Image (tube, coloured by chain):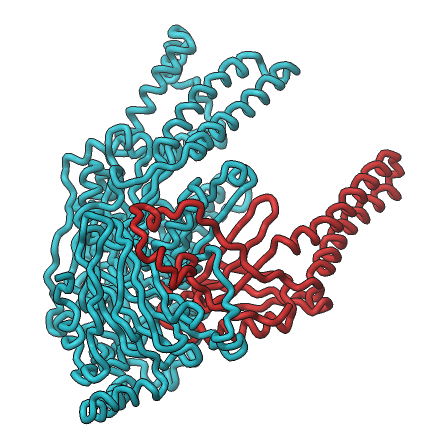
Amino acid sequence: MTGVPVVALALAATSAVGDSESVTETTTGSLAEPSGMRLATPQNLVSRKAIGYWTVRVALGWLVLIAGQVVALVISQQPWLWATIAVTVVIGAAHAVVMPQWRFRVHRWQTTAEAVYTKAGWINQEFRVAPVSRIQTVDTERGPLEQLFKLSKVTITTASSAGPVSIEGLDADVAARLVDELTATTQATRGDAT
Amino acid sequence: MTAQAHTSEHEPAETAVEDDGWRRLDPKMLLIRPVRELVKFVVPLFAIFVAGRVSGGFQYEYYSFIGVAIVIFLGILHWFTTSYRIGPDQVELRTGLLRRRHIGVPRDRIRTVDMSSDLMHRFFKLSAVTIGTGQQTTERHDKLKLDAITAQAAAAMRTELLHRTSVSTTKTTQQFPVDAAAGDETETELVRLDPGWLRFAPFTLSGLAAVGAAVGIFGHSVNDFRIALERYGPVQQAITTVEQMGVLAAVAVILVILVVVVAICSTVAYVLAYWNFRLTREQAGTLHIRRGLLTTRSVSIEERRLRGIEIKEPLPLRIVRGARVSAIAAGLSRGGKGAERSSGGLLLPPAPLAEAHKVTAKVLRETTDPTTTALLLKHPAAAIRRRFTRAIGVAAILVVIAAALAWFAILPAWVFTISLVLLPLAAILGWDRARSLGHALTDRYLVSRKGSLQRETTAIGIDGIIGWRIHRSFFQRRLGLVTLVATTGTPHGGHFVIDVTESEAVRLIAGSTPAILPTHHRHLTDTDCPPAGRLRPVRLPAATFAQVKAGLGMVSRNGRSSVSRRSVLSAGLVAGALAVPGIAAAAVVRSGRPVLTHGLQSGDVTATSGTVWARADRPARLLVEYGSDPEFRRARRILGPVVTPRTDLTGKTILPALPPARDVHYRITPIDLHDSTLTGQSQTGHSVPRRSPAVMSRSCGPATSPARAGESTPRAVVSGFSRRCAS
């Protein structure tokens, strides 16, 4: 993580500036319907420490489940509980190993002067955009586990009940800087469309 | 509600100012309140009475009379413990006996002032006033409700609170300035109830809930009191008749009766709720809705808060070509119960679809309703197929379950047979859903339509879009589709455009909020760009725009001192510039503001978009504004490209979502990369609408030379570019 890159976002279509051929272009529909335009994947990954954090968090959850079954086994002495415990351990281990790695690769974020972008999800993907000018609050959240890993979760809300943007697993320093920047920016803006 | 609910600490010397502006509710409430409370508690009180009567030993039925006395006493006490005050800054309400509550709503947060009068209110000419803020999480208790004051006072309060322009202390001039003295402003009627619309009432099914509730209560009480229905003569007769007719005929008869009863109930409900419906627009920019036969309601929606509209066509209503229209606005309550729910923003009760389109166009101040079907774009074939697979898939699963249950003899076989009917029904549903799908992007609205049983068409003003969500499920990804959600600060939250291609989603975002287009962008690794550490993160279109205006010496409407100081400053600079034009201008330029060295170029004009091109004298960011108003009053702003030596200091920007067949005025302002307050002189241009996509006008050249900025009125700027320059 190299801090919070403040990347000037150029419109994709403007990237060919100075390219005379595109200025004189006389296509009828290419601007209105840019074929094959794709959403950009935000550039920043979250902190690598988040892998450890997610692993521990998931493992704890599974351990509770396993502990419950062990207690049940001790009390009831049902032999088939060994099987369920084994299955739980296998699934839990797979989850704790695969999920954090995968999540680390798909959770992405980026801020520019204009907006905050996030992308998350491996099976169902969700991409969110919150314009900086419409940000209402920037919250940082640090649970005990996150403190242990020096991580923060930043939640950016707009006036809409539908569009909070959260970034989980940010390095605490990066998060602090991000919050500072967004707060400064937000204070300078008026109008959140309420 | 933490922001608004204050404790009484905020009122210093509260007791001393007891009569200072604090008013009580109308004294007639001393009569109404106890009666209403009694009605509320009539069931438990009556239960106590009955139970006391029938219980063998200790007869406590007279306690119910004590209860009645307490309820009446509390009802009267409520009047003495409740007072309100309309101060210059906030509206306050104090209420409660043991739990005192003090609610304060800042006046500039007030979004809605609604009035309602039930029968008792109306008898005494009273009105209950509910004052709403834009808070989405507003709980019922935090609402400021004055129940009740005289209807006259309520109307006056509404005018006073909503039309804040008449109060001199407010800080912003509004879009529709109103004469301070003109309290009884003129209003234009947009629509009123046509009695002929009653023909749509049976199709609203609002009676269904009433019938359901009645049946439920009836069944419950029959059970509770162990009433042997079959002993009664008419019931006996009915049972014998049914037995004679056979099951199918009986079911048919019951259905017919049910339909008739529901239709009657729905019609009654329609009349009760919507009689005297009137939608008007007041000069102060407020939509005013009044309706109701017995209980009258009055709802006001500030047009500034209006983010769009929603046309709802539930299937029964759609079959007879009817529709309802609701407002999508910040501050409208969505909670509430029963009829209040979601009807707060009702702009048109069930009425002909054509009427719905007419009202929509009038409310949105458009010539044609943007939700008109002909304007909507079709969704890709994959989206259509998805409607079928989803509908039939669900039905198929149900059929399989029914088959399995029938196989294991858990359910009788005829359940499975009947479940087969689901398949063709699902196919029809899927077909209808596919037919409903559509979306469009006009110059001001993002429109989308979906649904079958409850078809909804929403038109959201693109100015009100405050973010995006793009969702892609596993199945959607395989089909190359996404669901685009435009988020707004309204109770609806998000507005869905389901199952469009990714590039279409990008197009919609680009057309609505071009500045935040999340497409593949280049990293600026150019050496000419300042390192990231020095680049200011704050480059806000809004702020910059204010500075541009200030720099031009425009008289800002809010007229704050900082602006005028700036104007003086720039006037001073310009005075120097006027003395020795050439040199001074250069001096101003060299003092740090970037300058556009050539005229603006435009091209690539299609029906709805165009490209503008500019060149600066140093690395700079280009701020592009455009719109159909020559004075850029409702101009769209794009924080355009960064120009660097690598791009030959030139940059171009697409102007998406241009209004079709209208003149487009555009203005480009260079902004210093290191300091966003250093803005250069704007240049403006103007394009003539053309059918042919090839040509736009040539550039206008510098509309205002640095020297001319001294004639610091907006007029001067306008005259520079509003003439046609294509000649």
Query: Where residue B326 sits: x, y (%)?
Result: 29, 47
* The quarter of the displayed image where residue B107 is located: bottom left
Q: Quadrant of the N terminus of chain B?
A: bottom left
> The chain coloured red carries which letter?
A
Furthest residue toward front:
A20
Q: How many marks?
A: 0
Question: Looking at the picture, does residue B86 appear above or below residue A57?
Answer: below
Indicate left or right for B3 with B194 as reference: right
Residue B26, visible in the rendered structure:
no
Indicate left or right for B218 with B307 as reference: right
Q: Quadrant of the C terminus of chain B?
A: bottom left
Question: Looking at the picture, does residue B539 appear above or below residue A16?
Answer: below
Query: Where residue B427 sits: x, y (%)?
Result: 43, 23
Indicate left or right for B665 with B338 as reference: left
Residue A17, visible in the rendered structure:
yes
- Residue drawn at 83 percent across, 43 percent down: A72
- Residue drawn at 57 percent across, 20 percent down: B402
> The chain coloured cyan carries which letter?
B
Query: Where residue B208 sits: x, y (%)?
Result: 35, 32
Query: Where residue B556 sits: x, y (%)?
Result: 23, 78
- Residue drawn at 38 percent across, 17 percent down: B235
- Residue drawn at 54 percent across, 78 percent down: B533
Observer-nearest residue: B209 or B481?
Answer: B481
Question: Looking at the picture, does residue B561 appear above or below residue B281?
Answer: below
Furthest residue toward top:
B244
